[in-house]
Image (cartoon, rainbow, N blue to C red):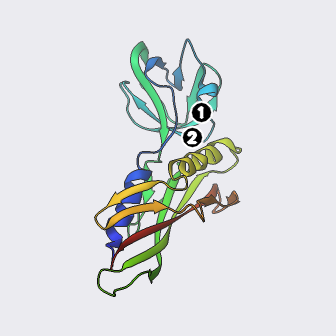
Amino acid sequence: MPDHTDLQLALRARLLTLSVCTTGVMTLEATLSGYQRASGSFLVDGFAVGMEVTPVGFSDSDRSVITSVSATVMTVDDPRTVDAPAGSRSLTVGLPELRAWDNTTLSPVAGKPYIEETFVPATASLLSSPLTGGVVEDTGLYIIRWYGKANTGLAALGDAVSAVLELFKPGTALTVADGTLRVRGDLGPWRGQMMADMPGWTVIVITIPWRLYSAN
């Protein structure tokens, strides 16, 4: 039988590479209330209200959540350290900092997006003889619940979920100890509807079916 811990960690490792949107490396400045740029557009880059931004190259490296955004001005939910315009900086939206991995406890923070992970082994079928050394097909689901701030519109949560689906497109292959784990092509990943959850939260569930062929 395959090592299900190995399978889950492979899926999680890929999820951790997620990039929803980024400015790329460029000249940016930090203000008391957020960030500014002299060229390009935060909107064109894909930033939206409710997204959690990771700054690189600034005095303050803490993440913050966007409260308003225009082409050249981004306002966030907590004060920033002022930095004059300089190059070699970036702003990126990826996986939320708050993550409830399986068998861990997370206390959500009001206004901060977070995810929950569930790994579901499903079926195991012997596809060929003999019993020892025959080909076994294992299937299952990798489920991510992405929670975002309520009343922030479609883009922040919807674009994040679309980026996850792109990362796990049908046929995506991950090397594991027992062989090659693949995102199923006959039953590709899907997302659920955007639903209100606890007060202040909206959630979308992403389901990623997987398949592994290994020796019995």
Tag of residue 125: none
Few, some or many residues within 10 Å of mark 1 (<14, 14–19, 20+): many
In percent of the image, x 55 and y 11: which residue is there? 38
Q: Amino acid at mark 1?
A: Phe
Q: Residue 26, how many percent across, how many down?
A: 45, 18
Few, some or many residues within 10 Å of mark 2 (<14, 14–19, 20+): many
In percent of the image, x 44 and y 25: which residue is there? 90
Q: Is residue 4 above or below residue 101?
A: below
Provide the residue designation for mark 2: 51
Q: Residue 193, how many percent across, how many down?
A: 70, 59
Q: Amino acid at mark 2?
A: Met
Provide the residue designation for mark 1: 47
In percent of the image, x 57 and y 51: which residue is there? 165
Who is closer to the viewer here, 19 or 170?
170
Q: How many marks?
A: 2
The answer to whether the residues at label 1 and label 2 have Cβ atoms under 8 Å apart is yes
Q: Quadrant of residue 6?
A: bottom left
Q: Quadrant of residue 129?
A: bottom left
User: Which quarter shows the N terminus?
Assistant: bottom left
